[in-house]
Image: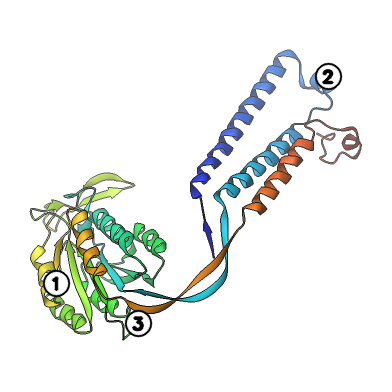
């Protein structure tokens, strides 16, 4: 296992393509200027030791050296020991609706992105709590199993979109049943399921399923995103709007937030419904609920004893810089004799 201490320094790698472009421009300028004064045969006699290959090789060594030094600034660290540690917390599972209706832009930037913002900020407020993510539309799928790695949770969350689910619809029942498999400790009494959706197309039996999962000790909270008056569902290709979703009659579909559906699910499971159109509102409420919940002890495995690895990259970087310094950009006498790079045959 590894981690990067200062990944921001990766931006410095942008200097490498710039140097390559500058090198090619200079090389082109030199060639075109030389052609104005003499032909290739005369230039070969005037500058017999000139070597484009070695000049290019020096640049390659220089760029490799710079790249390794930049990576050393990032300071990769390697986990050398996997150990079991005891932590206290609760289990929080997010069930995120990724149906097409969540692409409606009645709240900025759209319902799905607003939901991701809410989940991400709630994760930021968690301490040693475990977190899991489920996505659902026509079917429900596990996006991330229960884990203490909050960074991984946020990374997986950013990739959630309607294309990850094979069929459209809103299979909240499947999401609720899938959530049961996330809580692997029967003695863990503090288990939370947070459903984020616009409430459209939920099945009639959803309330009964929600009540069943609540009877198993899972506290269910629903967060609604979108406006009551609704909005059309944009259809985009490569980020460009090509129109809006239409029904079988050719009329534009207007998707509306169904707060009463989400409220009914929360009521059936003795939970709460929260308006999610303003990000801070659900974040503060959920943070308060979880912080006041009794924490249970659980075991988790994690890497420890991370050791710095930057010195290896510095050493390799300096090696290539030294090769660049001591490698002449012209043919040397002994190289001309052995013709190492077959330049005499060109």
Give residue 21's quadrant in the image: top right
- Look at the numbered disc 3 and give the secondary structure of its residue: loop
Badge 3 density bin: few <14, some 14–19, many ≥20, Cα 10 Å: few
Residues marked 1 and 3 touching at CB (< 8 Å): no
For residue 55, side relative to residue 279 (left or right): right
Who comes first in sequence, dot 1 or dot 3? 3
Residue at image mark 1: 266
Residue 141 visible in this rendered orientation of the protein: yes
Relative to the observer, which residue lies in front, 211 or 206? Answer: 211
Q: Position of residue 220 (x, y in %)?
A: 20, 73
Residue at image mark 2: 46
- Look at the numbered disc 2 and give the secondary structure of its residue: helix
Q: CA distance from mark 2 to mark 3?
A: 80 Å
Q: Quadrant of the N terminus?
A: bottom right
For residue 145, side relative to residue 204 (left or right): right
Up-down relation of residue 339 to residue 42 (above or below): below
Up-down relation of residue 160 to residue 89 (above or below): above
For residue 159, side relative to residue 212 (left or right): right
Relative to the observer, which residue lies in front, 339 or 226? Answer: 226
Q: Residue at x 73, y 33 (%)?
A: 55
Q: CA distance from mark 1 to mark 2?
A: 87 Å
Who comes first in sequence, dot 1 or dot 2? 2
Of marks 1 and 2, the one in the foreground: 1
Up-down relation of residue 31 to residue 192 (above or below): above
Badge 1 density bin: few <14, some 14–19, many ≥20, Cα 10 Å: many
Q: Position of residue 42 (x, y in %)?
A: 81, 18
Residue at image mark 3: 184
Q: Position of residue 244 (x, y in %)?
A: 19, 49
Up-down relation of residue 70 to residue 209 (above or below): above
Q: In the image as oriented, which residue stretches furthest toward the bottom?
A: 186
Who comes first in sequence, dot 2 or dot 3? 2
Q: CA distance from mark 1 to mark 3?
A: 23 Å
């Amino acid at each position: 296992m590894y981690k990067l201490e200062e990944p921001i320094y990766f931006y410095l790698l942008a200097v490498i393509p710039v140097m390559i472009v500058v090198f090619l421009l200079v090389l082109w300028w030199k060639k075109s200027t030389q052609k104005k004064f003499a032909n290739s045969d005369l230039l070969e006699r005037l500058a017999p030791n000139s070597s484009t290959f070695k000049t290019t090789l020096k640049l390659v060594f220089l760029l490799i050296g710079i790249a390794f030094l930049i990576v050393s600034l990032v300071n990769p660290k390697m986990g050398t020991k996997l150990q079991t540690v005891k932590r206290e917390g609760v289990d929080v599972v997010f069930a995120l609706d990724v149906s097409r209706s969540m692409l409606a832009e009645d709240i900025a930037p759209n319902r799905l992105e607003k939901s991701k913002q809410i989940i991400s900020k709630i994760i930021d407020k968690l301490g040693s709590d475990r977190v899991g993510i489920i996505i659902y539309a026509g079917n429900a799928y596990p996006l991330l199993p229960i884990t203490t790695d909050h960074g991984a949770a946020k990374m997986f969350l950013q990739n959630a979109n309607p294309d990850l689910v094979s069929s459209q619809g809103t299979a909240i029942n499947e999401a609720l049943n899938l959530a049961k498999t996330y809580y692997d400790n029967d003695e863990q009494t503090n288990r939370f399921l947070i459903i984020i959706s616009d409430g459209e197309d939920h099945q009639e039996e959803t309330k009964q399923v929600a009540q069943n999962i609540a009877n198993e000790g899972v506290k269910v909270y629903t967060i609604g995103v979108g406006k009551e008056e609704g909005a059309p569902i944009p259809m985009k290709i490569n980020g460009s709007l090509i129109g809006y979703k239409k029904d079988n009659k050719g009329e534009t579909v207007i998707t509306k937030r169904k707060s009463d559906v989400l409220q009914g699910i929360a009521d059936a499971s003795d939970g709460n419904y929260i308006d999610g159109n303003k990000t801070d509102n659900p974040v503060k409420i959920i943070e308060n609920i979880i912080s006041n919940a009794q924490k249970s002890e659980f075991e988790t495995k994690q890497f420890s004893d991370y050791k710095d690895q930057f010195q290896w990259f510095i050493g390799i970087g300096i090696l290539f810089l030294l090769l660049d310094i001591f490698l002449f950009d012209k043919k040397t006498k002994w190289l001309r004799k052995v013709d190492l790079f077959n330049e005499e045959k060109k």
